[in-house]
Amino acid sequence: MTRRELLVTGGAALAGAGLLLGGTARAEDPPAADGYTPVETPNGATLPFVMKDGVKEFHLIAEEVEHEFAPGCKVKAWGYNGRTPGPTIECVEGDKVRIFVENKLPEPTSVHWHGVLLPCGMDGVGGLTQPYIQPGETWAYEFTLIQHGTQMYHPHVDEMTQMAVGMMGMFVIHPKKASRKIDRDFSIFLHMWAIEPGTYRPDPSVMLDFNTFSFNGKAFPGTAPLVVRTGQRVRIRIANLSMDEHPSPSPAPTAATFRSPRGGPKRRSSCPSEPRATSNGSPTSRGTGPSTATNPTTS
């Protein structure tokens, strides 16, 4: 499967999903700024923070994790805070942030804030802009966010290996003033893996022959669907740290906003007189309940 085929297939799956978001850890989401819809990370979580003297403090832990792509498909991967990809970091333009990174890996690491405008010393390139974060050490990154957009974070120490085994996460920065209301805001991280039958660890040396494709670390049937209601304005943020060939990774964080169209695919029933039902189970006419249309219009 080519990257284009993957994105086309994945886009159709995202647009066509119509069940409840079963894997989003909303309890871990920090409060968003006034007027903003918090980002939802299906099958994932948002990194909590504490306010200290006007600074948002976050804590990332780089560590080995036991990860399940789908029922029965488990591997030993690397990630952050017990998961891969790591939890989504969510901030607002103008925030001053302090991010502690604790290294529980057996080798050095660092964190690069991909696409974020910041001082050189905070860029996270181990051995160049900062010392390596050695096993057992904690490093503090501190900077003010002077932009908004969809960015991401990943290591910059032996990055081809560390990213290949799962070290990455989304970094979302809301604008100071929202240009338009968004009803649902989703974050999706794409990745490709090489997992040989009978092994328990992804192979970081593979550059072409990937056999597992994940959305937020999950492969079908483990992926959580996206649910929107008819007429809602939806934003889907997509990041991609997969690789087609060495040494060129394809990092492409982007975001698309569209309104869920009215109507959807007709359901077939073995009982022609069966009444339609809303999500709460009560009979209703066409047009209510979650949308499952597959041709969103951009706006």
Image (cartoon, rainbow, N blue to C red):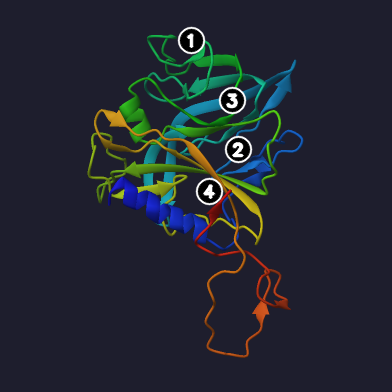
Residue at left 65%, top 30%?
Answer: 175
In terms of sequence position, does the residue under pointer 3 or pointer 4 come before the other?
4
Q: Amino acid at mark 2?
A: Thr
Left or right: 62 with respect to 140?
Answer: left
The residue shown at (68%, 37%) is 179
Q: Which residue is mark 2?
A: 46
Residue 199 visible here: yes
Name the residue that disc number 1 marks: 120
First-in-chain label (1 vs 4):
4
The part of the image, by quadrant, that contains residue 95 is top right
Task: Say which mark, if any, is on residue 59.
Answer: 3
Tell me which label, 3 or 1, sits earlier in the chain. Answer: 3
In this rendering, which labeled residue sits more in front, label 3 or label 4? 4
| Secondary structure under the numbered disc 4 in the rendered image | loop
Residue 126 spot, x, y in % from top left: 40, 14
Residue 42 relative to residue 51: left or right: left
Single out the mark in the foreground, 2 or 3. Answer: 2
- The three-letter amino acid code for the residue at tag 4 is Asn
Q: How many angstroms separate mark 2 from mark 1 (CA)?
A: 26 Å
Structural crowding at the residue carrying mark 3, measured as other residues with C-alpha within 10 Å and reported as few (<14), some (14–19) or many (≥20)? some
Residue 239 in the image: state x and y as whole percent: 45, 38
Percent position (x, y) of residue 106? 38, 24
Closest to the observer, 108 or 19: 19
Amino acid tagged 3: His
Residue for badge 4: 43
Is 228 situated left or right of 132 in this image? right
Q: Is label 1 in a helix, a strand or a loop? A: helix
Are the two marked residues, 2 and 3, in contact with CB atoms closer than 8 angstroms? no
Report, in whole angstroms, how far the alpha carbon at label 4 lies from the one at label 2.
Answer: 11 Å
Q: Secondary structure at mark 3?
A: strand
Of the image marks 2 and 1, the number of the one nearer the N terminus: 2
Amino acid on which disc 1 is placed: Cys
